[in-house]
Amino acid sequence: MVGNRLRAPSHISRHPGPASRRVFPTDVPAYDGAMAQSFSQLFRDLVPRYFDEPWSREDGWSREELDVALTEAGLDTVPEALAELYLTVGAVEDLMEAYYFVWDPDELEVQDGFLLFMEDEDETYTWGLPADALDVPDPLVHRRDARGNWMSTEATLSEYLLDYYAWVFEEIAPAVESAQEEDDEGRG
């Protein structure tokens, strides 16, 4: 760890995100009035899963803070799943800057027909949601490569984020810790 950011040693493969495995629960109800609560619970569960402490209200932005930030970004709406991410864990820096950067809501912007919400530390890859699907509760995530080409990840936002956090905390973090231990042993 460097600060709150994980940095992979050069011998650890850096690829643009999690593999296409799915850690998304299969028992999530269809989109209805309970969907926001479902997103909220999925994101709340990240705190005890990866940090061994209970979720607290302070882990997220307040609705008022989120509304002000979205207004500053010039946005009227964002998908329900993205709003719930900010409302439940948006203040958890260790999640929002775990390996890549999930943008704060006031930094969100629309480019190339996509609402940009995350980028890698080298600003080579950017993740976005189709701007014409911002009213969809959980739209598909797309990734822009260094050449500016957009490609679907074939995962909804909630699926992608859950896969991303599993990749970071279950694959990247242990590899980084192992490499650091090897470096420490080599120096000792």
Image (cartoon, rainbow, N blue to C red):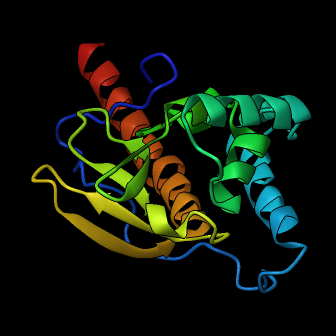
Q: Is residue 164 visible?
A: yes
Residue located 85% across and 40% down the image: 55
Q: Position of residue 45 (x, y in %)?
A: 78, 54
Residue located 77% across and 42% down the image: 87
Along the line of sight, the residue nearer the viewer: 29 or 150: 150
Along the line of sight, the residue nearer the viewer: 23 or 185: 23
Residue located 58% across and 43% down the image: 75
Along the line of sight, the residue nearer the viewer: 106 or 91: 106
Question: Where is the C terminus found, in terms of image quarters?
Answer: top left
Q: Quadrant of residue 25?
A: bottom right
Residue extending farthest to the left is 147
Q: Quadrant of residue 67?
A: top right
Q: Is residue 20 visible?
A: no
Classify residue 71 as left or right of residue 87: left
* Image: 182 above or below 112: above
Residue located 45% across and 24% down the image: 1
Along the line of sight, the residue nearer the viewer: 137 or 8: 137
Classify residue 88 as left or right of residue 33: left
Q: Position of residue 184 (x, y in %)?
A: 33, 19
* Image: 97 above or below 31: above
Q: How many marks?
A: 0
Classify residue 155 as left or right of residue 185: right
